[in-house]
Image (cartoon, rainbow, N blue to C red):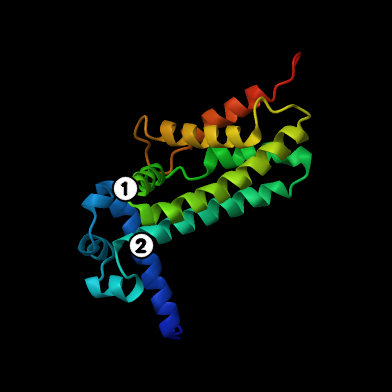
Amino acid sequence: MKPARLSRTQQQAITRERLLMAAQQVFSRLGYGGASVDLIAAQAGYSKGAIYSNFPNKEAIFLELLRLGMERDMTELEAMLSLAPDDMQNAVSQWLTTAHSDQDCPLLATELQLHARRSPEFAVEYYAYQAQQTQVLTRLLQAYFKALSVSLPMPAEDLATTLTALVNGLSLQQPVPHDAPNAPGQVIDRFLKALTRRQGD
């Protein structure tokens, strides 16, 4: 029996996904300035025309990677907010130690930050997504400390911003093999557990 033929819409979705995967690899390897539409298309195995059928320019690809990454993180964080207090600590610990261990992720995050500093137009979108992510992380930290009956050591939003900066910095300290445990996340997990440890525990 022949496999079902993909519709045009399905084919376009597959092409777009492959282009984005290729773009993440090229941006992470060469940086925003070193990447080009030609290189991204070649990495994905398509012609340059495939790029322009899906995206108007290189920055639009970069912005889509930002949107997808931020929305993925916010969805995962929102899901933990709905957990019972007894389950939340384990869920946060699991997320921190396993999420985004691929070495392309921290490199791409750094490229996004650098490009936001250099492109005012891109910065508007970047900082809007970043603010949304910080708000969700702030709510999670508030719930996390409340579930453990421990007072926050500083305003939750400040702690959320600090933890994000720590993860980004730790991720660039040394190369990490693909599919390795998320070492920066493990550090943050230990840090949070230290902050929430009650006297006498």
What amino acid is at disc 1?
Arg
Identify the residue at image location x=24%, y=48%: 30
Marker disc for residue 61: 2
Residue found at the far front of this picture = 120
Looking at the picture, tell me which residue is in the foreground, 82 or 123. 123
Residue 13: percent from the left, percent from the top? 43, 73
| Among the two numbered marks 1 and 2 on one chain, the one whose residue lies closer to the N terminus | 2
* Above/below status of 190 relative to 71: above
User: Which element is circle 2 on?
Assistant: helix
Determine whether, in the image, residue 4 is placed left or right of residue 40.
Answer: right
Res. 32 visible in picture: yes
Horizontal and vertical percent position of residue 200:
76, 13
Q: Of tags 1 and 2, which is closer to the observer?
A: 1
Indicate whether 153 appears above or below 136. Answer: above
Q: Amino acid at mark 2?
A: Ile
Dot 1 lies on which element? Answer: helix
Classify residue 159 as left or right of residue 52: right
Q: Residue at x 38, y 55 (%)?
A: 122
The reply, left or right, for residue 48 in relation to residue 113 is: left
Label 1 – label 2 distance at C-alpha: 17 Å
Which residue corresponds to mark 1? 118
| Quadrant where the image shows the N terminus | bottom left
Labels in figure, total? 2
Name the disc covering residue 59, or none: none
